[in-house]
Image (cartoon, rainbow, N blue to C red):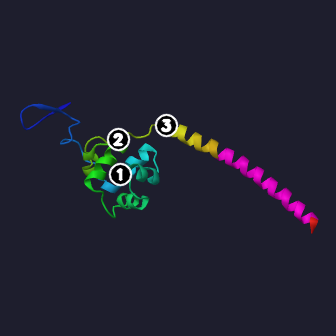
Amino acid sequence: MTDPDLSGGATTSSDIYFDTPDMDTIGGRLSRARDATGMTPAQLARRIGVKTSTLNAWESDRSEPRANKLTMLAGVLNVSLSWLLYGVGSAPEENTGVELVNVVTGHLEKMKRLREETAQVISRLESELERYRARI
């Protein structure tokens, strides 16, 4: 589908001037883009050279990044600067169902390993406790 532009030519429907803007705040878009990459706030803060508290302030709209950091954020998060600032343009890719299943499966496997390790530690602690009780 094409939409006419003011100069008489045609533009595609993905032209930022004709897209419906994302009505979230800069902080909300920043947080969503970071989540889409799978990075933690600490990881992203380290990548762009700011404190985690600074990034948290940006994501909660208590302050806004300067132009040089906005450019870095757009690059690291793989979104357009216009989307980050105004909600139009290239937004982050949404996780597909398959990716989500893979992430959840990975977390589940890690939790199972942690449960087994915890059971081993509990068993050792109980043995040690019984040894100490026998001495008393």
Q: Are marks 1 and 3 in contact (CB under 8 Å)?
A: no
Name the spot of residue 110 as percent of width and height, x first. 63, 44
Task: Determine the image quadrant of residue 92.
Answer: top left
On the image, the x and y values in percent for residue 124 come to 81, 54
* 32 on left or right of 125: left
Separation of disc 1 and disc 2 at Cα?
11 Å
Label of residue 99 in the image:
3
The amino acid type found where label 2 is placed reads Asn
Residue reaching furthest front?
49
- What's the amino acid at mark 3? Glu
- Residue for point 26% across, 42% down: 89
- The quarter of the image holding the C terminus is bottom right
Contact between labelled residues 3 and 2, with CB atoms less than 8 Å apart = no
Which numbered circle lies on residue 30?
Answer: 1
In this figure, which residue is indicated by the disc labeled 2? 78
Tell me the residue at 58%/40% (across/down): 106
Q: Is 28 colored magenta in this rendering?
A: no
State the SS at label 2: loop
Cα separation between marks 1 and 3: 21 Å
**Magenta residues (range):** 111-134
